Structures are given as C-alpha cells and as structure tokens.
Amino acid sequence: MDKIYDQTKVEPKWYKIWEEAGYFKPEINPDGKPYTIILPPPNANAPLHFGHAMYAVEDILIRYHRMKGDSTLWLPGADHAGFETQVVFEKHLESQGKSRFDYDRQTLYQMIWDFVQDNKGVMEGQLKRLGFSLDWSRYKFTLDPDIVKVVYKTFKKMFDEGLIYRGNRIVNYCTKHGTSFSDLEVIYEDRKTPLYYIKYGPLTLATVRLETKFGDTAVAVHPDDKRYQKYIGKEIEIETVLGKAKIKVIADKAVDPEFGTGVIKVTPAHAPIDFEIGERHNLEIRQVIGYDGRLNEKAGKFSGMRVKEARQTIASEMEQKGLIEKIDYEYQNRVATCYKCGTEIEPLPLEQWFIKVEGLAKKAIEAIKNGDIKIYPKNWETTYFNWLKNIRDWNISRQIVWGMQIPAWFCDGCKKWTVTEGETPDVCPNCKNANLERDSDVFDTWFSSGQWPYATLQSTRPPAKSDLAPAGGGDFEKFYPTSVMETMYDILLFWVARMVMLGIYATNKVPFKDILLHGKVLDPLGQKMSKSKGNVVNPIEVADLYGADAIRMALIYGTAFGHDQSISHPKLQAMRNFTNKLWNIGRFIIDFAPEDAKHLDPSVIPANAGIQLKKFSSELDPRLRGDDNPQDKQILEQLSKTAEKVTKALDTYRFHDASDALYEFIWHEFADKYIESTKDRRAEAQPVLEYVLKTSLELLHPFMPYITEELWQKLPHKENSVMITNWPTIVDSSK
RNA sequence: GGACAAGUAGCUCAGUUGGUUAGAGCGCCUCAUUUACACUGAGGAGGUCACAGGUUCGAGCCCUGUCUUGUCCACCA
C-alpha cells in the first residue's frame, strides 16, 4: 500500500465492478422491504454543476438501507426541461448566427433532441464518477414514450373529470420568448415608474399604463366611496388623444379608495384584476397590445409602436392637450419580468389549458397535516401551506416546441376540443367532422415532472398497463409510494408540491413519505454559483483533485442539513486528509501486522453476518481475544456508541451528526488514542484492530464508498463487498 | 404586506427536549518525531454566543421586542 492515498488510482475502478455485480439493483435484496428514492432528474441541457453533488445525501440513505437489507431502489432519470432547454438551445443557435425561426417545428425538435442526448451522456458519467449507486437498468427520460403516455393519460383523466378547462384568461406573456408562464415563473422587480394622474371627463384617475387606455371598457370606483356615488352606473364623456369617447362608471370592491384618486380605469385585456372586474360586470375585453408587444390597430395612430414608446408618445400628447393633471415620478411599483430574459411580462388574454387546483391543493395540504408526508426541516411546512392555500389555477400551456405536445384537437365544425391519450382522432367524435387541428402548444415541464414518481415506476417493469395504477406485481406496486423525496428547497413549490397534488390525484396515494430539503451550495465567498459570474465548478474536476469521497463528506460534514453552505478548498482538503488518515489506519493494521499476530477468526465472526456490537459492554467480546484489556474495552464501547449515534442520526436525517461522530471516532479515538496505545502490545491487539477497522468501514461506507471498499478488499477477513455487507447492529448486553 | 432562516473564535460552521470550565475544521503560536500517516502528533492563544428586556436556582438554547443579513410568497392599478 502506498504511503499516500491516491484516490485517482482507486475511485475510477470500483463503480463498474459494483454495477456489473448487480449491487445497484433492488433485486440484490429480493426479500427486503422496499426502500425507494426517485432521483430528482437533472435538466438534460447542461452538464452537472457542483450543487448536484448534494445527491450524496440520497446515496447515503440508499447505501445505508441497502446494507440494512432493504430492497433498495434509487431510480435515475433526466428531465427534458422544456422551456429551460429551448432557451439554452436558442442561445446555442444564436452563437452560430441562427435562430429558431430558421427551422420548422420538426427540425428544431430533432436538433434539440440530439443536443440533449449528448448532455445526458455527460451527466450519466458524472453521476457515476461521484459514486451514486443508481439502478441504471431503470433509467428514464421524461420524453420516453411510456412516460409521455402516462402524462397524456393523466391529462385526459383530468379533462374528462372537468379538472382541466380551456380558458381565455390573462396569462403572463413574455413577448421576447413568445410564450406564456405560470405565476411562479415571473419575477417582480422594484422600479420607479411614473404614475400619471389623467383626466377622464369629470374624474381624475391614476395609472402607469397609459398605453392600455384604448382597451379601457369602464372606469371603476369603490361602491362605498362617497365622492363618486353620483357617477356610478352612468356613462361619462371623456376626451382622449383619439377624440371624444363615452365610458361607463362601475362600482367594484376591488378598487382601493386610498390609492391615487380612488378611481381606476378598467382594462380587462391587459391586467388580471381588471379582467376579473370585467367578468363581474360583463365588460368587453378589448385587446390593444399584440403578442409581439406592439399596439394594434385599435390604438389608431399609435398602432405598431412598442409599449414603452407608445407610453411616452401618449404622455406627451396628453400633456399638450391638458389631459394630465400631474405626474408622480417617484412612484415605486413592482414590474413583472421574465425570469429568463428580464423582459417585462405583458399580461395578455390567451386561450390556454388550465388546471383547477383548489381541490388538489386541499388534499396536498391534508397529506402533510395528517402526517402521511413529513417535511424536513419542518419549517418549510409554512411556506408549503401558504402557497397551496392561496394558489390560483395553473396554466399548463406553453408556446414552444420542446416538450410534450398537448394531445388536444380542435374541431372547426362544432368548435369543440377532443382530448386523447395521444392517438390522433380520425374525425371529431362530436360531429364526425374530419377537419381537426392539434393544439400546437406543449405542456409546462412541471406538469410532466410533477408526475415523475409514478410515471417512472409505472413504466419500468413490467410494461405499463392501460390503467393508471395497473394491477399485478411490478415496480409501481412494490416501490410506490416512494420513501423519500430529497431535493433543494428552491423547488418545493415548483415541483414537490405539484408532485404531491398530481400524485394523490392519479394514484390515490402520496408519492413519497418524507420530503427532505437540502440547502444551496455556494462558492467560497458565499455567493451563488452561476455561469454569468463565472464561478461554476465542475464536480468531476474537484473529484479528480480531492476524490469523490472527500466531496461527499465535505458536503455533509459541519453544516446542519437544510442550511446553505459554501464549499471551499480548505474544507475539501480537510476531508481529503481524512481519507488519507483512514488509508494509513488501514495500512498500519493490514500492511504492518506482525508475523505472530492472531487475526479475527472468521469461524466465530462470519464475514457477512453483520457485526453485532455490544451496547456499553463492560465485558470484552470473548470472540475477539482472551485477554481483558481496558483500552480494548474502551474502544469497543466507543465503537458501539458511534454505531448507535450514526444509526440514529441517519434515521432522523441528521447527516451532519452522523459524519461528525464518524470523523471524531475514527480520527481522534481510534487513530490518535487507541492505535497509539497498541504499539507496545501489537500482536495481541490485532483482532480488535481488525474488528474496529472493519466495523468503521461499514459505518463509513454510505458516506465514503470508494475508500471503504478499497480497504475492505484488503482486509484479511472479508467477503464480497462492503456495499452489501450488513449494517452493524447493536445488541444490549445488559439485558 | 406576509413568511422562513441566519447572526456563536480571525474565517467556515456545530451546539437535539435549558444543566459543570461554549466545541470542531481551517488559520495563528509553541514543541515533537521521520513515525501507519507532514495530507502527522502533543499542547496553546483566541468568544460579553447581534442587542435590550423577561421567565428560571440556572439561558447560546425558552418568551417579548429591536437591529442586521439572506431567501421565498403575494401583489398594487
């Protein structure tokens, strides 16, 4: 054995051996109780970044449960990440001087498909290099035909049951990307925007959106506002930049009498609240801004202008005509912007598919309240509840090509929609018209990834049956509901909450029992890693430098689970040093064993029986040696305590406690004290040394799989692999 | 407007139902040995636990308030 542990010689060789031996498959423990984690599928549009190394948490749980004898499944996959990927690809095209408009839909889709295939391959290599014991035979991609089939089925079921409707509603629309978004994908920015006090006949009202005035179909005041009682229900004549016009005054409680003058213009086509007011009062929806972000013909001479230009032009004309009473330039408001490009989001009316979420949300809340699902750390429950309580219907239509095209056909005869499970209908089932046109939109990615836990398990083995919850024994029956969903807290609402809603809806069961939310991995300065800052780190480069084991341990050790942490070279070095310490413990015990040493006797302690540690025993295990030495007893007692701590910590998701206990025990108790104490009685201590080393490797294996396997294979007394040995159990010798 | 988290040694962070002299890693200082390991060992300096009250025999931990930092949700015409 080398003096210095060289992980580059050790780490790359084991993964293949494990995988080929079938250790990653649940079938290695065919009779165990199921333990399942579905890997949050990384986006297939870029290689993994350092934050993905946090999957280590899942691997720790998986390896621990596998050693405990559970039938353990960790299912890998990749997400097509619809809009995200299309944006990445468009930038890629841009760099070649092209744009998505240079290609037809089929060609563009195929190009993105090929692009994604390349990335998927890179990602798989990265996941393997980090030692993640995923069952690759069950690998899934969100656009696999059998996954798409499941998603289509859910959509049809929801449509048939009236949970999905086609609505002409105000959506968040990015005029640059040419698609709508859900509420979660909009970022609000604080900005100073001029607030214009404009004259509408006898009234004055405050607005920032002068350019939408051509879409005004009413003026509204609060019903109890004494100042304006005499106007309610009347039509007033107003002077505008396009001449005189008449407009109705209505009363609605949505108006805040405290804001501005207590009068608002109602533009149902261009503001969500106005749209709602319009619905209550049956107002005309007059759209004056197009999907290209320009004013249309209804804006008269202003048509063709972009929103900003129009606003300024109109403002100056109105000032000339004396229609502006005053302008508040200090007004602070919040502007909706596209989370990708920063373009101002235009609220526009558009026909889209919406999900009625209220009922689903109620069940999702209930699942946490009644304990079917637990969230760790618990404080995230508040965020979860608040969002679900106030949730609005979910727009799942996206005007892009990359994704699952919605299986809905519009009949130009009877003007009705037909939804299928994917197959193209020959004629309209309502009127037998053959003129059907498929909706060109695709699903919001989160609608498909929200079904990931059951979509994956229903489509692995055996092949999915026609029902959503097929009868008969398959992965779904055995492994669903899954045990743990572990991901970063930032997608609790985007993804986890939606999985709960859709999972309960489609399967009548929660999709997972425990939700674990880890923190963000930051750079050494505590800053978020991002491509634009240039501080992204490739985990593979770090693994080559310090070892995958060191990365994994560094991410777990020293930070309470759930908290953000910055990753730094000193910390990685510290963990690399720990691997070297362990290596030299092994070297001392194995390479430097004296000739006359007795070894651990395999006939009394079978290799794979799982070591049973005695709890706080005052007696030495007679199987280890005949002598009664106080140091031996002490180290064995500390070993028992450590095993107990680690087991308890893993069962309660206190990973940092577990790693802390192991680090402390192995380095400072075992190496610094006990091993030093055996140097003058080395031969007689050999069985205890081997026993403690062996057990330490077992306890440490979920955290540092590579070095523990390498040392395990060098033990004089070993069998198979530390990966599939039994987890050390504790027996209470006092009883 | 609402919510959550954090504030502990120079830096990065632990500290699980309140209980002796508040811990670790890195850094710093002193010393040791070429040792299984210098990716080492032994020892040391260094903290008014953000602030102000309160509960208690006893508070880093519980309660109230304040300040600072980070994040999220809602949405303003």
Image (cartoon, rainbow, N blue to C red):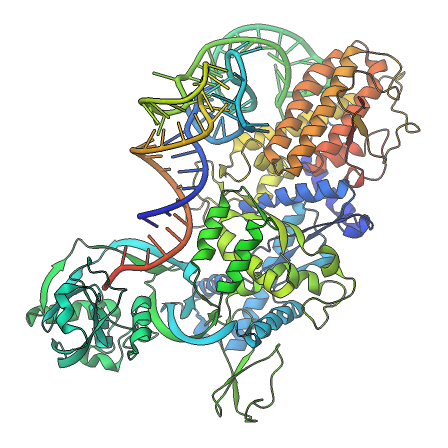
Residue A663 coordinates in the image, percent (x, y): 64, 26
Q: Is residue A539 left or right of residue A670?
A: left
Query: Which quadrant of the figure has residue A69?
Result: top right
Residue A42, x across and y down, in percent: 58, 55
Query: What's the residue at 70%, 47% (across, down)?
Result: A133
Front one among A577 and A669? A669
Q: Indicate whether A601 appears above or below A129.
A: above
Image point 61% across, 58% down: which residue?
A: A78
Q: In which quadrant of the rendered view does residue B33 lie?
A: top right
Nearer to the camera, A582 or A722: A722
Give the image location of residue A291, x and y in percent: 35, 74
- Residue A295 against residue A433 in the figure, above or below: above
Depth order, front residue of B50/A732:
A732
If the image is split into quadrants, where does the N terminus of chain A sit?
A: top right
The answer to whether residue A141 shows anywhere in this view is yes
The residue closer to the viewer here, B13 or A526, is: B13
Residue A48 visible in the shown view: no
Please identify the residue farthest to the right as the structure is shown.
A603
The percent position of residue A154, horizontal first and vertical second, equals: 60, 70
Quadrant in which the C terminus of chain A is drawn: top right
Q: Can you tell which quarter of the image residue A289 is in? A: bottom left
Task: Work out whether A633 lies above or below A571.
Answer: above
Residue A602 horizontal side relative to residue A632, left or right? right
